[in-house]
Image: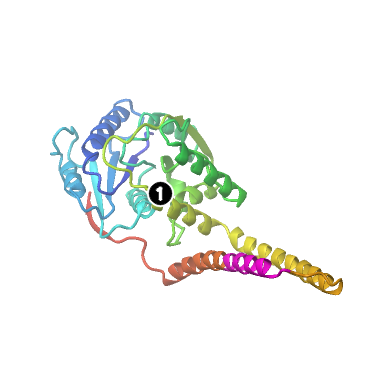
Amino acid sequence: MRPLLWIVVPCYNEEEVLPETSKRLAAKLDSLIAREMVSGGSRILLVDDGSSDATWRQIAALHDGNLNGVSAAPGVFCGLKLAHNAGHQNALFAGLMHAYRQGCDCAISLDADLQDDINAIDEMIERHAEGAEIVYGVRNNRDTDTRFKRSTAEAFYSLMRFLGVEMVSDSADYRLMGKRSLGALSEFKETNLFLRGIVPSLGFATAKVYYRRGERFAGESKYPLKKMVSFALEGITSFSIAPVRLITLIGVLAVIVSVVMILYALASLIMGSVVAGWTSLIVSIWLVGGLIMIALGVVGEYVGRTYLEAKGRPRYIVDEVLE
């Protein structure tokens, strides 16, 4: 039996790239249906994450089948408009949950910028048919990244593994999820989503499909350095309390060093040695003060996350749906 596939694409201010993205995705879906790899009722779901440009108007035109240059029957493209910008992870989650509620057999998520090779979708569906509940799209190189981005990405994955977080290296949000894994994902209620850590923790059978990541087709990246840092903090604080434990360890070490320094000062006093004092005092004040500020910052991150979770506000609000 051919699976009912939904392709979920979160979009934020993607008016420059969306016509080309939709054209390629429509052609890919037609090819999959023609080769009987997926059901004829398969759909492409475009999630507008509170865009301020013409993204939603383009999605509405695609839904009606009248966007210039895109050959697709009315209804092939579906639209989900969020009332405000909820963030990439929430927009993606909203799309996956909508596809799940519509009875899809599997859903493939990918970004709208055409950097992910859509030809890998074929192999993803094959791996799913062979029994893999989750299939990850994994980059086989980082040639298109700058040296800074490549080094920071490697450092991030190493840090997450050190903290005990399950993650698939060089895999972003390009993945296939089956109906069972989508159902399991729907049980996660936290406000601060980090899907790259949540999905591997589900525990279902997985597979990997390797592909070459290309350049962005048009427009600007929606992940500048500020958002990348925020995303990294989200992942760390969502899955590990190791930083808090590290603060405790640093505190213990600081106490030990302090005891040693006290003993050294007393010994110097008894032996009549002259202790300069001022330099060591200033260094100690700055060092301890810096450690205290870092500790407060780390603890504050966790308190802030707890505060957001305790309020229980919805992750997103759907403004309009095009079925």
Magenta segment, prevailing SS (helix, strand or loop): helix
Q: Quadrant of the N terminus?
A: top left
Near-viewer residue (175 or 148)? 148
- Say left or right for 231 vs 63: right
Q: Determine the image quadrant of residue 149.
A: top left
Q: Position of residue 76 (x, y in %)?
A: 23, 39
- Say left or right for 286 vs 50: right
**Figure check: 223 above or below 71:** below
Q: At 55% from the left edge and 67% from the top edge, which residue is drawn? A: 293
Q: Position of residue 101 (x, y in %)?
A: 34, 52
Q: Is residue 61 magenta?
A: no
The type of colouring in the image is rainbow
Q: Position of residue 321 (x, y in %)?
A: 23, 53
Secondary structure type for disc 1: helix
Q: Position of residue 105 (x, y in %)?
A: 39, 42
Q: How many marks?
A: 1
Near-viewer residue (180 or 145)? 145
Where does label 1 land, which residue? Answer: 225
Neighbor class of circle 1 (other Cα within 10 Å; few <14, some 14-19, many 20+) is few
Q: Is residue 284 magenta?
A: yes
Magenta-highlighted residues = 276-292
Q: At 31% from the left edge and 39% from the top edge, which residue is drawn? A: 113
Q: At 57% from the left edge and 50% from the top edge, which residue is drawn? A: 165
Near-viewer residue (3 or 198)? 198
**Residue type for callout 1:** Leu
